[in-house]
Image (cartoon, helix red, strand yellow):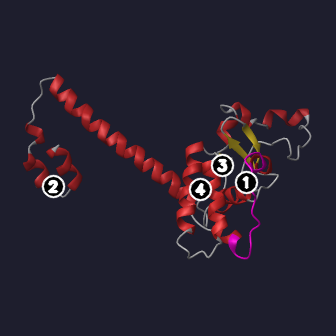
Amino acid sequence: MSLSFFLSGERDHHTAPPKKSLGKHGHNLMLDSGSESSYLPWSWARAAILIRMNSLISGCPAVRPVIVERMQDLLKHDIIPMIPLRGSISSSGDLSPLSYISGAIQGKSTIRVLSRGSGDMYADTALANTSVEPVTLQAKEGLAMINGTTISAAVAALALYDTHGLAILAQVLIAVSVEALNGSTESFHPFFSKIRPHPGQNALAIS
C-alpha cells in the first residue's frame, strides 16, 4: 500500500505541516476535484471484486469458499474498498490495489470503504454494521487474493462495454444524419465492404 497515493483518513498517521519555505513546492490532492480523484470509481472497484470472484471459484487458487462468500457480501451490502487511483497497477499483477479488497474482507481497521448511505468509513466498522463476519486468511490465500491483473481486466471490460455502446450510437447517428440530409446510400453498397477484409465493416454496411 505504500506504493499508492491516497488521502489520509482519521486513523492514519498525520505528518506535521511542511516548513513555510517548502510550502510552494507542495500540492494538495484535495484540490483535484475533491477526494474522489484519489480512488477508483465505484463501478471499477465493484467490477474488480466480481472478476476476482470469478477467478477464485475455478478452484485452481485453492481458497476456502468463505473467501468468495465474503467478497460476495461486499457486493451485496455495497461495502466497496477505496482503492487508490494512483499506484501500482499491472506491474507483476495488481498487487497493491487488490490488497485493499483483501483487507476489506478481513475487516482491517486501516482499510477505508465506501458504503451507500453511510459514506466513507473503515472496513471493520462497515462489516460490523452489516453483521458480516470478517475472515482470517489461511496459508496461500493472501497470495491468491492479490496475485492477478484483476483491476486492469475490470477497467478494460468496462471500457470495452462503453466502446461497444458508443459504436452502436455512432451507427445510429450516421444513419439519421444521412436520412436527414437526404444523402446518397451508394457509399454503403455491399461491394465496398466485400472487397475489404473487415468483418465489422460488413456488419455495419448490412445494418
What residue sits right under mark 3 in the picture?
86
Q: Amino acid at mark 2?
A: Arg
Mark 3 and mark 4 in contact (Cβ < 8 Å)? Answer: no
Question: Which is more foreground, mark 4 or mark 3?
Answer: 4
Q: Residues within 10 Å of mark 1 (few under 14, many from 20)?
A: some
Foreground: 120 or 187?
120
* Viewer-nearest of discs 1 and 2: 1
Say which element carries label 2.
Answer: loop
User: Where 29 sits versus 155, above or below?
Assistant: above
Q: What's the distance in space between the residues labelled 1 and 3, CA to CA? A: 29 Å
Instruction: Classify 10 Å Cα crowding around label 4: few (below 14), some (14-19), many (20 and above).
Output: many
Ranked by sequence position, the earlier of labels 4 and 2 is: 4
Q: Which residue does the numbered mark 2 point to in the structure image?
A: 196
Q: What amino acid type is highlighted by mark number 1?
A: Val
Query: What secondary structure is found at the residue carrying circle 1?
Result: loop
Image marks 4 and 2: residues in contact by CB distance under 8 Å: no
- In the image, taking residue 16 as reference, residue 196 lies left or right, namely left
Question: Range of the magenta residues?
Answer: 127-141
Whole-number angstrom distance, CA of label 4 to CA of label 2: 41 Å
What residue sits right under mark 1 in the picture? 132
Q: Label 4 to label 1, Cα distance in Å?
A: 17 Å
Q: Earlier in the sequence, mark 1 or mark 2?
A: 1
Return the x and y of residue 134 as percentages of the image width and height. Answer: 76, 59
Identified by mark 3, the residue type is: Arg
Mark 1 → mark 2, Cα distance in angstroms: 57 Å
17 in the magenta segment: no
- Judged by depth in the image, the label closer to the viewer, 4 or 2, is 4
**Front residue of this view, candidates 21 and 180:** 180
Of labels 1 and 3, earlier in sequence is 3
